[in-house]
Amino acid sequence: MEKNVVIRITLISFVVGFMIAVQYNTVKKPESRDTRDIWEIRQELTEEKKLHSELLNEIASLKNIKAEYEDENSKELGKVLQSTVEDLRVRAGLSEVTGPGLRLNIKPAEELILSGFKVEPISPDLLIRLVNEIYRYNGLYIEIDGQRVVHTTAIRDINGKTTVNSVPISNSNVDILIITETFEQAEKLYSYLYASTFQDDFYIDNLKLTINPAEEEITIGAYDGEFTNSYLLKSEGD
């Protein structure tokens, strides 16, 4: 009888000890928690809301197009289709486009060159960062040194030269044209870029980034390359 009691006490003591050890370990090594401050979380939430708003606007636009298809008679349907095709060409970069926007310029910083610093090609990584931020802050269309930026555009280093669409850009004078949906958005983009660190980032590479005020009309040329799609196959009769 006494033996059974001892065994039970031993088992209970083992279980209690195990639970205490687990609890101690949990307190000692808590799970990693989100350490972002409230402003970082608010900024991320704002970006998600902007993305959500853009998706809603896109859905509304597609619904309007669908409604036009359903309402128009057969004679007018061709015009609606033509309008839709032209809109898609503009979005894809296959048509010249004019609208409000900004002009940026990148060239060697003269005071640094006179001091003997060497002119280096514009960093592809820095250029990609700039393009991503432009798109993030409502830039619709971008042209870099005469090259239209489209969804297939690659900005990279090829044999020591920075290229856009596989075409080398200038080391000494590069114009970047940006078009936004409205003039107000162009002004906001100007304010953001002017207050950002990009001018300092380019200056570290001995380059001067000039951010010009928003303009009412800027024209960007069409993409002159070819789009390829490996997922679409032509039939033998095509």
Image: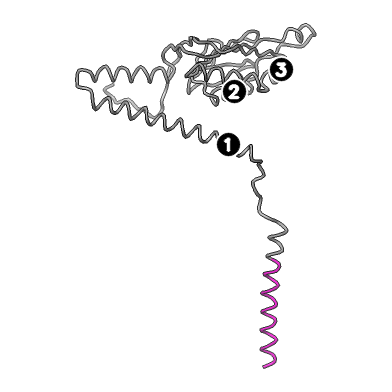
Q: Quadrant of residue 98?
A: top left
Of marks 2 and 1, the one in the foreground: 1
Disc 1: which residue: 44
Image-quadrant location for residue 132: top right
- Mark 2 or 1, nearer chain start: 1
Give the left or right position of residue 64, taking residue 139 as reference. left
Q: Is residue 75 left or right of residue 163?
A: left
- 147, 136: nearer the viewer: 136
Residue 31 in picture, x, y percent from top left: 66, 53
Judge whether residue 168 can be spotted in this image. no
| Residue 208, numbered label | none
Residue drawn at (63%, 23%), measured in percent from left and top? 125
Residue 128 locus on image (x, y percent):
59, 23
Q: Amino acid at mark 2?
A: Ile
Q: Residue at x 65, y 8 (%)?
A: 172
Write down the residue under mark 3: 205
Does residue 10 belong to the magenta stretch?
yes
Q: Are marks 2 and 1 in contact (CB under 8 Å)?
A: no
- Which quadrant of the figure contains the N terminus? bottom right
> What is the CA distance from the residue labelled 2 to the residue labelled 3?
15 Å
Task: Identify which amino acid the numbered label 1 is placed on.
Answer: Glu
Dot 2: few (<14), some (14–19), or many (≥20) neighbours within 10 Å?
some
Q: Nearer the viewer, residue 168 or 185?
A: 185
**Residue 82 found in image quarter:** top left
Residue under circle 2?
A: 128
Q: Position of residue 75 (x, y in %)?
A: 20, 17
Start and end of the magenta stretch? Answer: 1-21
Residue located farthest toward the left when viewing the structure as drawn: 74
SS for callout 3: loop
* Distance between the alpha carbons at the discs numbered 3 and 1: 30 Å
The CA distance from mark 2 to mark 1 is 21 Å
Q: Secondary structure at mark 1?
A: helix
